[in-house]
Amino acid sequence: MELILIIETIICIILLLLLVRSNRKQTSYKAREAKIIDSQQFCLNILDNLPFPVFVKDINDDFKYKLWNKEAEKESRTSRDAILGHSDFEIYGEERGRKYRQIDEQLVKNKVEYQAEDDYITPDGTLHNTIVNKSVITLGNNHWLLVVRWDITQIKEYEKELIQAKEELENAIKTQNLVLNSINFGLVFVDKNYVVQWESTANLHEIAKGRRYSAGKVCYQTAMGRGAPCMKCALSEAIETGKPVRHEFTEADTVIEISAIPVCTNTGEIQGGLMKIEDISDKKRIERLQYEIKKADEANRLKSAFLANMSHEIRTPLNAIIGFSNLLAETDDPEEKKEFVHIITSNNELLLQLINDIIDMAKIESETLDFTYSDTDINQLMEDLCQQMKLKNTRPDTVKIEFTQRQPECIINTDGNRIMQVMINFMTNAMKFTERGSITFGYEKSEKDIYFFVKDTGIGIPSDKKDRIFERFVKLNTFVQGTGLGLPICAMIVDKFGGTIGADSQEGEGSTFWFRLPF
């Protein structure tokens, strides 16, 4: 509107200059008159070429039009020949002419400017929204009405579109707030300088007391009262690495998950991070319940497998012991008696090992397995193991057993019996599955731990079954005697030591079973 007033003032000055020039005394020289005429024409050309409608009415001559510029012709679709020298009644008819005349007369009477919105329809049927400014120009006894009209049709369309867009945006914000207020987690958008740009954390007040995020504030200052980002800040890590980050922490009985993802531009530049803060206590409880159900199902499956396995494994040596005991009583052949005694002894040992394994498994699960620590000479322990295994070797001609890797002296404080138990299981397994080649074992000692191993040249372990060998009752070869408890017991013993256990194997090339014990 200020621009309209400025332009209107300029027009008034031009008109006054024009009128003053036209009313000067006729006593000037011809050259002066020529210049005056040129000035008048120049002023008229300016008015005629202004980019908005300008027209002038002569108040003393029944408000008839004296000026109608080109833009007025263009917008109204009416030529100046049809306008100049005519009044509003003659141009627009009685009704519209009366409307304009009342406004003009009131304006002259009150001597005030008039400004209002005025809609009109051009002959082609187009509706125009305009702003009309009217003001009185007086020079002596002559009075003119200056009218400037601004077409605001396009502005009105823009205004409608803006109002509609505003309403749609407000509705979208209302819907968004309804959704955000109904969720059970908080969202915070923080720029790369850790300034909160947007937050919806109303639901955090109960699950993370003391955490407050405020738009325009540095997050770690308002949320945690710190002067620098937290040491384990998920948001900081996501911004620095450009990858999603997830952290969990516990406050009292509440488990809170903080997830952060980097927010990037189309060019890949990181602008900040979006952080999600959620109470996952119920989720964790459900996960624990599902785990317990799975564990119970697994225990039930293992119990069934145990009963099936044990009934078979116990029956086999018992049948052998009973059967060959009867045969031993009936035969008089010394060679047969010796063979029967050997078979009975072997099955006695197998049955005893089976019972010992079951007892050890029960003790480990009930956490009653005893560990007796004392200074143990590892070299002596390995020598005893070597002699014992050589005596049990049923293939001395094709399988060589050796204690190959040692240190000159190695005495540590540990439970030698439990180490021997694990190594015997490893050696027994190696002897079962090695028909020719060698079985070597030994240890390596470092500053932090001691590493034991048993290496064989046996059949090896298929890659798809390697991860299951330490599970209970797992037997990769059902034709070989055993309960499937030996390796799981080894794993439990090593775990009680605080160590790690594993196996490296290539099918058809042999295996290496190992475990590490910390000092």
Image (cartoon, rainbow, N blue to C red):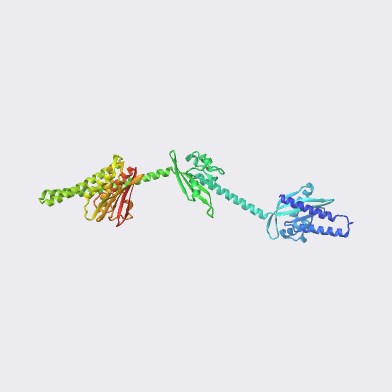
Q: Where residue 348 appears, x then y in whole percent?
A: 19, 46
In this orientation, which residue lies closer to the viewer: 459 or 260?
A: 459
Quarter of the image where one finds residue 40: bottom right
Q: Residue at x 64, y 52 (%)?
A: 159
Total marks drawn? 0
Q: In screen coordinates, is 301 left or right of 234?
A: left
Q: Where residue 392 appears, x then y in whole percent?
A: 22, 50
Q: In screen coordinates, is 145 left or right of 205?
A: right
Is residue 39 visible to the viewer in this orientation of the structure? yes
Is residue 311 visible to the viewer in this orientation of the structure? no
In this orientation, which residue lies closer to the viewer: 518 or 61?
A: 518
Q: Where residue 458 appears, x then y in whole percent?
A: 27, 55
The residue positioned farthest toward the right in the image shown = 27
Quarter of the image where one finds residue 47: bottom right
In this orientation, which residue lies closer to the viewer: 491 or 395?
A: 395
Q: In screen coordinates, is 239 left or right of 93?
A: left
Q: In screen coordinates, is 436 left or right of 237?
A: left
Q: Where residue 250 appears, x then y in whole percent?
A: 44, 41
